[in-house]
Amino acid sequence: MNGRTVPPTRSFTRLLVGMVAAGSLLGLSACAPEPEPTADPAPTAAPETPEPAAYDGPLHFVGDELDWFLLSADEIAAVVPGAADFSEPSASLLQVADGYGAMFDPETCGVFFLEASLGSIGARSITWQAENERQGRLSVLQFADEGQAERRMDDYVAASEQCATFTFDQSASSFDSAAIDEDGVRTVVGSIELGTPDSGFRHYFGIASAGNVLVEFWHSYTGDSVIDADATARALHARADQAQELLIGELTANPPAPPTEPPAADAAAAWSDWTIGFDGVGPLRLGDDIDTAVATVPDAEVSASEWAPDQRTLTSPDGSASLQVQAQEGGKAVATILAGKIALYGEPPVDGAVLPRAGEIRIGDPIENAMTAFPEGTSVRVVAAGLHFYEVATRGGRVLLFHADRDIATPGATVIGITAEDGTLRREYTMDALRSQAETDSP
């Protein structure tokens, strides 16, 4: 056709030919055999769902994910001579002090005697005891973010490079070590001898870093015992690498939810109606400028002390309750907000009925209630300061601390205070930070 007009005679001829052809086909079809049935067509395959892209964000381990770093008793015994009588893995942490005072040359060698757990926000550990009552431990330490763990590990790597020989209180000392740096995991393992071999200060020491985690092991030894530093480093490194793969798989399947704004709190409500959460307390928000934050609480009396210029104490209008707001060291961002007390030191506890609560947990409740309501946390004892608390953290480095009046393992331990904290603003215990602090404190 193509737009052309067909003459009537040609059109009639085509119609006649078509009718004859159709009649012929009908006749043939009446004589033709029945066609064989055909098989049902294959079902159309459903479109394949593409595999999600592997998670490539920050490697922030949290809670029971720390267990992934623990070596088994057999694995430890295979590389640490004499290791035996292992404890069960524990969600607890024992800290002795908050620094060190001995003199080292080079100064960076002091990192071996600085508690690796300082500044951490979660832990899992296992301990053992060997002959001559020598003890050892393996601790998995969670920090608020990768940067904090990386900066701490930088000190250990520097010490492994500079402290093959060093002096401790003017005594010749050594650190014979092996190191691995592969696949995002760094590991240092070796033997430390302080002074003469009969001085009693001989230790195996190891440290590994992955994401926001440091894994530390420490074991005292005597006599001719010799650790296989290479084998121990490989064991720590392999387990940390495996933990990374597990976390990537977990976060690929269940990507972290983006942060959301917390619901607005009624600043004018009674403080007992406020809640303590990972974002702050009532209308007070972690990370805000401290003066802006305290201004959100109407009619509160705000006071500061000369010895703590970065701290504000808020007292309620009726004088029945108070909150302590602390900015980060040397800054203005709110780092912690405390309701109640961190320790009693012989003083009476505060009245929890007039203070905010964390979920359903109020000051005065049994500490075990907090541990049940906020699982996967860590029980901490700080010996030098006489502090006991249970801390639980988020993947983003926010922390709730439930301060107890006694050892958390003691029956009857109760909550005497609750702190909301931004762990990313915690004081850091790198060698540079400690050096700077010492220079500031010196007269």
Image (cartoon, helix red, strand yellow):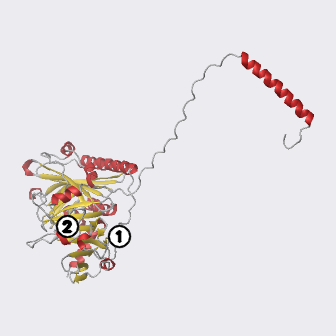
The x, y position of residue 176, in whole percent, is 22, 55
* Tags 2 and 1 touching, CB below 8 Å: no
Sequence-wise, which precedes: disc 2 or disc 1?
Answer: 2
- Residue at the spot x=34%, y=50% of the render? 247
In space, the residues marked 2 and 1 are separated at their CA atoms by: 51 Å
Give the quadrant of the C terminus.
Answer: bottom left
From the image, tell me which residue sits under label 1: 264
Could you tell me which secondary element the residue under label 1 belongs to?
loop
| Crowd band around label 2 with a 10 angstrom C-alpha radius: few (<14), some (14–19), many (20+) | some
The x, y position of residue 124, in whole percent, is 22, 54
Nearest the viewer among 397 and 385 is 397
Nearest the viewer among 353 and 138 is 353
The relative height of residue 424 versus residue 76 in the rendered view (above or below) is below
Asked which quadrant contains residue 369, the reply is bottom left
Asked which quadrant contains residue 106, the reply is bottom left
From the image, tell me which residue sits under label 2: 104
Name the kind of residue labelled 1 in the image: Ala
The x, y position of residue 308, in whole percent, is 22, 79
The relative height of residue 415 versus residue 440 in the rendered view (above or below) is above
Could you tell me which secondary element the residue under label 2 belongs to?
strand
The x, y position of residue 150, in whole percent, is 32, 61
Give the quadrant of the N terminus.
Answer: top right
